[in-house]
Image (cartoon, rainbow, N blue to C red):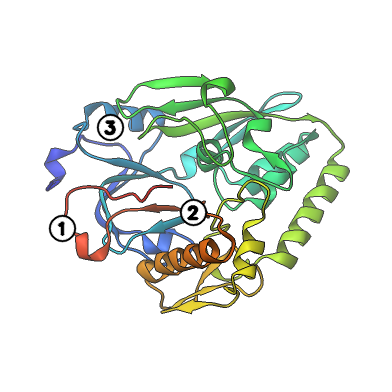
Amino acid sequence: MTLAANSLPPVRGSLKADAPLGPLVWFKAGGRAQWLFEPKDAEDLSDFLRLCDPAIPVMALGLGSNLIVRDGGVPGVVVRLGKPFARVEQVDATSLRCGGGASGILVSSTARDAGIAGLEFLRSIPGTVGGFVRMNGGAYGRETCDILVECEVVLRSGERVTLPLDALGYTYRHSMLPEGAVVVSAVFRGVPGEPAAIQAEMDRIAAAREESQPLRSKTGGSTFKNPEGHKAWALVDQAGCRGLQLGGAQVSEKHTNFLLNLGDATSADIEALGEEVRRRVREKSGVELEWEIQRVGLFADDANQENLVRLSK
């Protein structure tokens, strides 16, 4: 499907054709977006989606921290929520309203300053509120479903709706959020706490993460979901995959549930390495690892196809 500028609705934000996505994701690899849309506000996004041909695929992009963008690029429109969606404001004594583009660090720091405890774990997740809500992001024994009150989303139809917690059907790293919906804000609730104690917990989490994870590398965060009764990293290690390399991609030696771009990896290298790890774990332990990292777009040799390719999660 050829998408000329005049085939897309007018916008008040930014709309760029053939936009590189590699620089916007943590792996620093991958193809281009057919169109990259950065809306000025939720109304701009709503108007655009309402008037946009329903056949055009739409995908939301946050910090790109848990994402492989395939080398053939992403057809249709990639929506990136910028600064207008990165605000966090206090609603009441224990609640915050957070823009879909707000980072975990900003949310947890704002909660600390407001004396709201229980949101410290967001400090350790390298993503945005929109990603947390969609994927039920979590760490250190807490998940988004533990703190979410409600979220506002713009549906693919352009309709803006508010969804309560129980409408999202949360399970481990999964929600029932409609396909194509973009999370523009969420209300998180914690409990009263002392800022100094909250900061101490944030410091503890940050130190634990620094010690155990390859934070200063080109990586995509946790690669595989923890299977029932297992830790993914331990299964990867037992299968002999620590340090395993394919092209420019490597299994981290520091934390085996992280894949690294050593500098010149293609997204195909990274994904193929992940599939080889899955094969070896299955052969060694009989456990089928499921991807936690999202993989989107076209393979390089399929770049001329018009269908968005997604492997089963």
Instruction: Classify 255 as above or below 141.
Output: below
Marks 2/3: CA–CA distance: 28 Å
Q: Position of residue 94 (x, y in %)?
A: 75, 26
Q: Which residue is mark 3?
A: 48
CA distance for labels 1 and 3 = 25 Å
Amino acid at the residue labelled 1: Asn
100 on left or right of 113: left
| First in sequence: mark 2 vs mark 3 | 3
Q: Which mark sits nearer the N-terminus, 1 or 3?
A: 3
* Mark 2, other Cα within 10 Å: few <14 / some 14–19 / many ≥20: some
Q: Amino acid at mark 2?
A: Ile
Q: Position of residue 89 (x, y in %)?
A: 63, 31
Where is residue 290? Give x, y as percent: 50, 51
14 and 147: which is toward the camera: 147
Which residue is at 62% across, 57% downward?
232
The residue beneath circle 2 is: 293
**Image position of 29 with respect to 188: above or below:** below
Residue at horizontal 67 percent and vertical 45 percent from the top: 122
The secondary element bearing badge 3 is classed as helix
Residue occupying the point 50% across, 37% down: 134
Q: CA distance from mark 1 to mark 2?
A: 24 Å
Q: Nearer the viewer, mark 1 or mark 3?
A: 1
Give whichever of 305, 27 is nearer the camera. Answer: 305
The residue beneath circle 1 is 304
Task: Tell me residue 266's x, y (percent).
Answer: 37, 71
Disc 1, SS: loop
Residue 109 position (above or below residue 297) = above
Look at the numbered disc 2 and give the secondary structure of its residue.
Answer: loop
| Cβ atoms at labels 1 and 2 below 8 Å apart | no
